[in-house]
């Protein structure tokens, strides 16, 4: 697990070092600028390339789509019912951080390592489904659960979410899959190249933010633990239950079920900070959730994953 998460932590540490040596004259403005690059260009390009090239054959697992999506929907329903009295910024961060996982960077390689290379296609499909559903839904949750219920100039949270290219990227990628290969290839090459900068830049930006706001970020709240627990414990448990039901009904295969459980146990996605920073909602809580869940993941996953997989 350390090998998988170490590059993420090193990139965050690099951003903190940039702040310590005062590489940026105005760290707040630099974070905002880098975030716009990630949110409006790099992350949409990365998502477009990943979804457009994902292997989307369901093979013998008709319940796979339900198993990927249903646990997240159930988790958000539970959080929505139990967190009404939580401070809006923390509640918004809780919903967003618990629903979006670091599937593409960590999940797909770990699934292939633990189950076998034959599941790379299923894991890619899961990543595509996760992105298509959770990016629009997570953005809506962030805005709806945040201060003021997401209203800005009369625009509803749904309208504000739909303004983001990040929301449209997976949908456009699905449509682009119908294009002939000779037309899609010239688009995929620059998208892949630009998208490769998304994670390193975003992680360094988080490190810079960590250094700039280190005093505020040390003020841990119980909701931070709730976010990490929901992401690393509750969501995998819900995924396991969903898979067991699917296996009993013959709607999902064992390998597909293992992929669902592994991907559900991933830490909070880096993308969540880009969204929180853009809207100024739950930034500190999201940063604590990303870093905290990534660190906790290295402890929980080696212990939890084998025990959950043994249930199948």
Image (cartoon, rainbow, N blue to C red):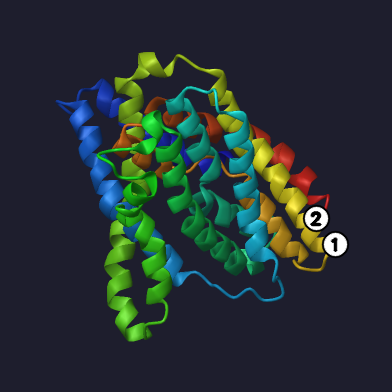
User: How many angstroms separate mark 2 from mark 1 (CA)?
Assistant: 6 Å
Categorize mark 1 by other alpha carbons within 10 Å: few (<14), some (14-19), many (20+).
Answer: few
Q: Position of residue 160 (x, y in %)?
A: 32, 47
In percent of the image, x 47 and y 22: which residue is there? 87
Residue placed most toward the observer, 229 or 159: 159
**What residue did someone put label 2 on?**
244
Residue 282 in view in this figure: no
* Image quarter in which the C terminus is found: bottom right
Is residue 55 shown to the viewer in this render?
Answer: yes
Identified at 53% across, 25% down, the residue is 224
Residue at image position (48%, 40%) is 96
Q: Name the side, left or right, on which 34 lies relative to 230.
A: left
Image label count? 2
Q: Which residue is mark 1?
A: 248
Is 106 on the left or on the right of 174, as rendered? right
Q: Nearer the viewer, residue 18 or 176?
A: 176
Mark 2–mark 1 contact, CB under 8 Å? yes
Residue 207 in the image: state x and y as whole percent. Answer: 35, 30
> Relative to 167, is 80 above or below?
above
Residue in view at x 58 percent, y 24 percent: 225
User: Which element carries disc 1, helix, strand or loop?
Assistant: helix
> Which x, y percent locates residue 226?
59, 27
Residue count near mark 2 (Cα–Cα under 10 Å), binned few <14, some 14–19, many ≥20: some
Mark 2 element type: helix
Residue 51: image location, x then y, percent: 45, 66
Camera-side residue of 221 and 268 = 221
Answer above or below: position of 185 versus 247.
below
Q: Quadrant of the N terminus?
A: top right
Q: Which mark is residue 30?
A: none
Name the outermost residue toward the left.
25
């Amino acid at each position: 697990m350390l090998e998988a998460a170490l590059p993420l932590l090193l990139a965050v540490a690099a951003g903190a070092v940039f702040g310590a040596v005062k590489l940026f004259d105005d760290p707040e403005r630099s974070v905002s600028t880098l975030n716009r690059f990630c949110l409006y260009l790099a992350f949409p390009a990365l998502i477009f390339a990943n979804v457009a090239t994902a292997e989307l054959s369901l093979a013998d697992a008709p319940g796979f789509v339900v198993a990927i999506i249903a646990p997240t929907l159930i988790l958000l329903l539970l959080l929505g019912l139990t967190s009404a009295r939580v401070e809006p910024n923390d509640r918004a961060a809780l919903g967003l951080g618990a629903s979006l996982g670091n599937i593409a960077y960590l999940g797909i390689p770990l699934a292939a390592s633990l189950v076998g290379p034959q599941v790379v296609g299923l894991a890619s499909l899961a990543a595509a489904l996760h992105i298509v559903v959770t990016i629009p839904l997570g953005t809506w949750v962030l805005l709806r659960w945040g201060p003021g219920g997401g209203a800005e100039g009369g625009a509803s949270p749904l309208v504000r979410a739909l303004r983001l290219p990040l929301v449209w990227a997976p949908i456009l990628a699905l449509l682009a899959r119908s294009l002939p290969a000779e037309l899609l290839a010239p688009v995929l090459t620059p998208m892949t190249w630009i998208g490769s900068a998304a994670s390193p830049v975003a992680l360094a930006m988080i490190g810079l933010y960590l250094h700039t706001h280190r005093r505020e970020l040390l003020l841990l709240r119980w909701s931070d633990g709730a976010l990490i627990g929901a992401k690393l414990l509750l969501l995998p448990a819900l995924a396991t239950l969903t898979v067991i039901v699917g296996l009993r009904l013959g709607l999902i295969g064992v390998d597909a079920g293992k992929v669902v459980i592994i991907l559900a146990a991933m830490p909070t996605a880096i993308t969540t900070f880009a969204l929180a920073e853009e809207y100024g909602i739950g930034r500190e809580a999201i940063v604590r959730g990303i870093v905290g869940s990534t660190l906790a993941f290295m402890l929980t996953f080696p212990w939890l994953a084998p025990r959950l997989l043994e249930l199948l």
